[in-house]
Image (cartoon, helix red, strand yellow):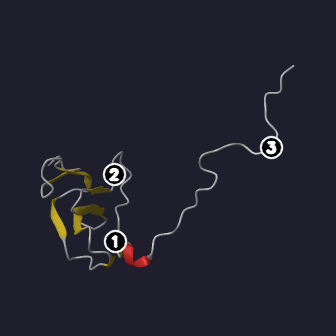
Amino acid sequence: MKQLWFRGVRSSKFRHVYGVPAKREGCYDNIKITKNAHDSHFCSINPKFVAVVTEVAGGGTFLVLPISSTGRLDFNSSRVTGHRGPVLDIKWNPFNDNIIASCSDDCTV
């Protein structure tokens, strides 16, 4: 009868890989992300910008931030408004990094 398991060290490509936490100056701080539990993402990224769906009362908004602007952010600095309902999803145009589309619960794009 053959043994089905191996005694000893398992060979794995990832056994010597360790993660390093990101430094605070390279992170975004003071962003209240959405609490909407829909089947979509709360952020979208392209080579120039980061877009994040935020939690606000009275309608849907999202932030558009340059990739280079990290650290503590002013919440009202780059907020995009235009929906009456919560924002469900945001997507960047794959051919133009300056165009973004958002859809919301009020059936508008």
Q: Residue at x 60, y 46 (%)?
A: 13
Q: Residues within 10 Å of mark 2 (few under 14, many from 20)?
A: some
Q: Residue 30 vs residue 62: left or right? A: right
Residue annotated with mark 3: 8
Mark number displayed over residue 56? none
Q: Quadrant of the N terminus?
A: top right
- The answer to which of marks 3 and 1 sits earlier in the sequence is 3
Residue 61 seen by the camera: no
Q: CA distance from mark 2 to mark 1?
A: 15 Å
Q: Nearer the viewer, residue 22 or 43?
A: 22
Q: Mark 3 against mark 1, which lies toward the viewer?
A: 3
> Regarding mark 3 in the picture, which secondary structure is present there?
loop
Residue 109 x/y as whole percent: 14, 49
Q: Mark 3 against mark 2, which lies toward the viewer?
A: 3
Q: Residues within 10 Å of mark 3 (few under 14, many from 20)?
A: few
Residue 59 x/y as whole percent: 22, 62
Q: Residue at x 16, y 64 (%)?
A: 81
Residue lying farthest to the right in this orientation: 1
> Regarding mark 1 in the picture, which secondary structure is present there?
loop
Q: Residue at x 27, y 76 (%)?
A: 75
Residue annotated with mark 1: 31
Residue 97 seen by the camera: yes
- The answer to which of marks 2 and 1 sits earlier in the sequence is 1
Residue annotated with mark 2: 41
